[in-house]
């Protein structure tokens, strides 16, 4: 064989080997892609069966622990937090969720910011103060908070015993008053409302920092005259109290409510008829803020997406847990949103427009 023919033969063999290698690589790539597609399909089935998995695998998740920071056990957040936990636990996403009783909004901000809770109920005004470093959070800005959705209006309720003689906000002067649990959003509301009436804590006879349930017990025992709480109506703590003791809601005059709204635009003025509270008759002028679900900016997009999707696909479960669960509606999910929405949650809302 001549040298020229030998070189040609070697080059031909090399080309054949190169083609076989390329084909082998293509087959391997095809096999890997098939495996990845199978994985997406399997995750779709694991992620609740009917849940759509986007092309980028947004619904895929490794699951994990989800602590839901709520409020006192006598308030509205706690049963709703329990319902959210049950929904997540039953979704087939390998979540282990549990509701955590807390001091409510202000404390919940810290829990989310520090990574000690994954989901939290927080009032929209408190969320705003936190991310902007104002009011309660002056000098302690928490920019990592992101909103999932808004839920329902929370009414600032001022409950007084009939024997206290308290009929107006001004009548609170010299009285024994509970202003919410330490670290709660209730106290934020108390200070703003008292300030609108030219009243400070020094004008009160006694200031107690109590949860809903504790304040109810102390009204029963005669240790305090009135208590503030910010919650949806009916509040189980007040409903129970009203069945055994003579109490009433103290109104906020409309002109004072308007002054409050001008300074704090998160408030709204409402006239309510709380027939759920025994002995309460006629309309009561009140102000309200909005409850919302908040997470940390570091939450995976898939988790944020899953949470809001599952929440709005299981509103019956929310309603069964508490009457206010029936007020949660998809078309109002972003009404009153006071902070940046988490991109995972926003993706869901964009899809269902």
Image (tube, rainbow, N blue to C red):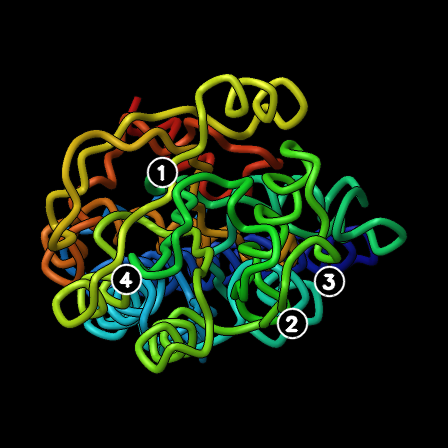
Task: Rate crowding at label 4 as few (under 14), some (14 to 19) or many (20 or more) other CA atoms within 10 Å.
Answer: many
State how far apart marks 1 and 3 are (Cα).
94 Å
As drawn, 211 above or below 343: below
N-terminal-most mark, 4 or 2 = 4
In the picture of the structure, the residue carrying the numbered disc 1 is: 153
Please tell me which residue is depicted at 21% across the width and 50% down the height of the picture. 325
- Give the number of the disc on residue 115: 2
Q: Secondary structure at mark 3?
A: loop
Image position of 123 (left or right of 17): left
Please tell me which residue is depicted at 43% across the width and 36% down the height of the picture. 288
N-terminal-most mark, 3 or 4 = 3
State how far apart marks 4 and 2 are (Cα).
21 Å
Q: Secondary structure at mark 4?
A: helix
In the picture of the structure, the residue carrying the numbered disc 4 is: 80
As drawn, 192 above or below 14: above
Foreground: disc 1 or disc 3: 1
- Seen from the viewer's position, the closer of residues 145 and 251 is 251
Image position of 320 (left or right of 193): left
The quarter holding residue 265 reads: top right
Q: Secondary structure at mark 1?
A: strand
- Give the number of the disc on residue 1: 3
């Amino acid at each position: 064989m001549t040298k020229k023919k030998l070189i040609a033969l070697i080059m031909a063999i090399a080309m054949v080997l190169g083609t076989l290698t390329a084909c082998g690589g293509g087959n391997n790539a095809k096999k890997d892609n098939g495996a990845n597609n199978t994985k997406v399909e399997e995750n779709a089935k694991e992620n609740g069966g009917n849940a759509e998995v986007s092309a980028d695998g947004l619904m895929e998740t490794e699951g994990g622990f989800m602590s839901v920071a709520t409020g006192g056990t006598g308030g509205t957040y706690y049963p709703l937090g329990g319902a959210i936990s049950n929904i997540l636990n039953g979704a087939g996403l390998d979540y282990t969720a549990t509701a955590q009783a807390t001091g409510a909004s202000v404390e919940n901000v810290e829990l989310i910011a520090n990574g000690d809770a994954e989901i939290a109920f927080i009032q929209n005004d408190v969320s705003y103060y936190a991310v902007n470093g104002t009011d309660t959070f002056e000098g302690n800005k928490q920019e990592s908070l992101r909103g999932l959705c808004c839920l329902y209006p929370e009414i600032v309720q001022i409950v007084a015993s009939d024997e206290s003689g308290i009929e107006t906000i001004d009548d609170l002067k010299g009285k024994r008053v509970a202003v919410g649990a330490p670290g709660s959003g209730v106290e934020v509301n108390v200070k703003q409302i008292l300030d609108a009436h030219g009243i400070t804590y020094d004008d009160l006879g006694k200031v107690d920092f109590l949860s809903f349930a504790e304040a109810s017990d102390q009204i029963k025992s005669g240790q305090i005259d009135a208590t503030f709480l910010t919650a949806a109506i009916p509040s189980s703590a007040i409903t129970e109290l009203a069945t055994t003791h003579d109490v009433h809601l103290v109104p906020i005059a409309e002109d004072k409510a308007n002054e409050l709204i001008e300074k704090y635009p998160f408030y709204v003025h409402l006239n309510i008829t709380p027939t759920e509270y025994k002995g309460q008759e006629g309309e009561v002028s009140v102000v309200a803020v909005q409850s919302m679900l908040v997470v940390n900016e570091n939450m995976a997009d898939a988790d944020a997406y899953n949470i809001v999707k599952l929440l709005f696909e299981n509103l019956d479960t929310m309603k069964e847990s508490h009457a206010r669960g029936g007020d949660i509606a998809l078309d109002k999910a972003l009404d009153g949103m006071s902070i940046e929405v988490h991109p995972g949650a926003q993706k869901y809302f964009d899809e269902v427009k």
